[in-house]
Amino acid sequence: MNTKYEIKNPVTGKATQLDAIQGTIGPDVLNIAPLLKEQGVFTFDPGFMATASTESKITYIDGDLGMLLYRGYPVEQLAEKSSFLEVANLLIYGSLPSKQQLDAFQDSITRHTMVNEQLLRFYQGFHHDAHPMAMVSAMVASMAAFYHDSTDINDPRHREIFAHRIIAKLPTIAAAAYKHSLGQPFVYPRNDLRYCANMLNMFFAVPCEPYAIDPVAAEALDLLFILHADHEQNASTSTVRLAGSTGANPYAAISAGVSALWGPAHGGANEAVLDMLESIGSVGNIDRFLARVKDKNDNVRLMGFGHRVYKNFDPRAKIIRGMCYRVLEKLGRTDSPLFELALRLEEIALKDDYFVSRKLYQNVDFYSGIIYSALGIPRSMFTVMFAIARTAGWVAHWQEMVSDPHMRIGRPRQLYTGPTKRDYVPIDRR
């Protein structure tokens, strides 16, 4: 049963009826389209805090309950029982695959991991200390020049080929960016390795000696990728949708998402956690640091705690915490001063009434940065790893949008507060 809300103009007394649209779960949304026509007003919602920009069937978040669902499946169940490629398949196709479907999907991803050799030569144009996110964003955009045989967004088969290609090739592109920064030769993908093991090999293998892939490291990456695969209409996903709504080729849309993810308030948060830990220096400085955090006149922030959406706890952090300890123990990093500092900070903050009362609990970024660092992945690559995982969600949202026959170009409106109309004044009279 649809509910109607009445909005009345306090000046004219004119009323407008707004329909409340119900989703399967979550709050209703108001269809505000009649407001402009009938009342001559826009809505004002900086940061889109209370605006539903689209209808979607992919991911649902309940921040109060700490709930994250991919296509209806709790992320806790997927983290325990699934794999990243199965989750990617779920996000893209809408349901859990059969064994035959998953095998076919994994085989397709595996056989799309190589990139055009001329594309690899592009890296020679980047300075050795170029940020990896700059390289990855540029390389993804450049893919449209090499794989233009499947960029017809109106062709379902083209959309599917693109989806497989970008998920398969992004680890190869990321690993090449890392190798370029080290001055080491590129390591080509191997079809005998699974997705995360293959990526670790491309990152850390060298031609002069064999590289043994640690199964715990591969498992940790797979778990991180599952937890980061999608997160509803966040900044980067909304960017992919907005860019894609213009009809741009899908590589351009994903490149835009990579760039949006680069921001420290979004994908760079786990890097900020490590920066914070280094600034604290040692366990003995924690009390002094936390006192600064509590000081309203000090700009110091406790990174990796709290979340804009989750109000009580981050379900992803609860899952990854155990893996964090497991990785540190397996790799013999529990005696590292940095990791000792992180674990001690976690212990103190969780018992401090100031943080407990404000619901400043650990989020997924607190642990992901620690795990990446323990695996030997440099800080500059943290956001790249996030991008590899989130590509699955970006692709799913892009496909959902462009397959909608009612798709329209995104066009937000504004509240204008600049000068009113004025006449041009010649330069000699100013």
Image (cartoon, rainbow, N blue to C red):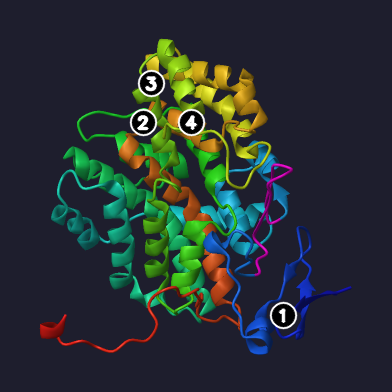
The one nearer the camera, 214 or 413, is 413
Residue beneath disc 2: 275
Label 1 Cα crowd, 10 Å radius (few <14 / some 14-19 / many 20+):
few
2 vs 3, front mark: 3
Q: CA distance from mark 3 to mark 4?
A: 11 Å
- Residue 65, image x and y in percent? 74, 43
Residue beneath disc 3: 280
Going by the image, does 310 lie left or right of 151? right
Point out the image quarter for the C terminus: bottom left
Kindly identify which numbered label has been placed on residue 71.
none
The one nearer the camera, 390 or 95, is 390
- Answer yes or no: do the residues labelled 3 and 4 have beta carbons within 8 Å? no
- Residue 206, image x and y in percent? 24, 34
Q: Which residues are magenta?
A: 55-71
- Between discs 3 and 4, the one toward the N terminus: 3
Kindly identify which numbered label has been placed on residue 302.
4
Q: Which secondary structure lies at badge 2?
A: helix
Label 4 Cα crowd, 10 Å radius (few <14 / some 14-19 / many 20+):
many
Residue beneath disc 1: 9
Q: CA distance from mark 4 to mark 1?
A: 44 Å
- Answer yes or no: do the residues labelled 2 and 3 have beta carbons within 8 Å? no
Circle 4: residue type: Leu
Point out the image quarter for the N terminus: bottom right
Q: CA distance from mark 2 to mark 3?
A: 9 Å
- Residue at image location 24% in from the left, 28% down from the top: 209
